[in-house]
Amino acid sequence: MIVFDLETTGLPKAEGSDLNMQPRIIEFGAIKLNESLEEIDRLEFFCNPGHPLDPVITKITKITDDMLKGEKPFIANYNRLCEFFLGSKSMVAHNLPFDRKVLKFDLERIDKVLHFPWPYWHICTVEVGESVWGKKRKLGDIHEEVVGEKIKDAHRSVNDVEATIKILKWYRSEGHI
């Protein structure tokens, strides 16, 4: 099982919009778990999107243009990403449709969508939470309720992945997944 999170250059535009107008990954973080939900591997990297970040993205993520200046574009991380995902049965994210869509945009830009080893089970902790709480909830709100503390440095990929794993473990212990 791979739990992952992306930080991006923005939100997706309407379906059918020019691919160049769609957001790009600027930070990728993932932790691979075994059946007992224990960490067995992790992968994290920055991607240079090829243009300056919108100040609102820097405000939310604390990722700056200087942090991305020496980083390579998404394509440079493609092989490592494939090796990491290869053989995994499940992919998990908080608001998975968003993360999956932006990952797909970057894969489309390098013509690799059909070559990527997509896991066949997709679990969205927002959707699981809807049946638990009766509404969609933010990662930080669920984490605070379930774990009893705020996420340290939220909106950074690996920190959000670690928070998602704590929530995933709680969902499993309570019989929600």
Image (cartoon, rainbow, N blue to C red):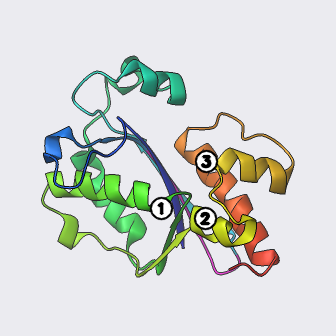
* Horizontal arrangement in the rendering, residue 47 relative to residue 158 (left or right): left
The image shows residue 52, relative to residue 87, as above or below, that is above
- In this rendering, the count of numbered labels is 3
**Residue type beneath disc 3:** Asp
Q: Label 2: how many residues lie within 10 Å, few (<14), some (14-19) or many (20+)? A: many
In the rendered structure, are the residues bearing label 3 and label 1 in contact, judged by CB atoms less than 8 Å apart? Answer: no
Q: Which residue is mark 2?
A: 125
User: Between marks 3 and 2, how big is the CA–CA gap?
Assistant: 12 Å
**Residue type beneath disc 2:** Thr
Question: For numbered disc 1, what is the local secondary structure?
Answer: helix
Q: Which residue is mark 3?
A: 160
User: Between marks 3 and 1, how big is the CA–CA gap?
Assistant: 13 Å
**Residue type beneath disc 1:** Leu
Segment colored magenta: 28-36
In the rendered structure, are the residues bearing label 3 and label 2 in contact, judged by CB atoms less than 8 Å apart? Answer: no
Q: Residue 30 magenta-drawn?
A: yes
Expressed as whole percent of the image width and height from the top left, the position of residue 8 reads: 39, 39
Expressed as whole percent of the image width and height from the top left, the position of residue 80 reads: 34, 58
In the rendered structure, are the residues bearing label 1 and label 2 in contact, judged by CB atoms less than 8 Å apart? Answer: yes
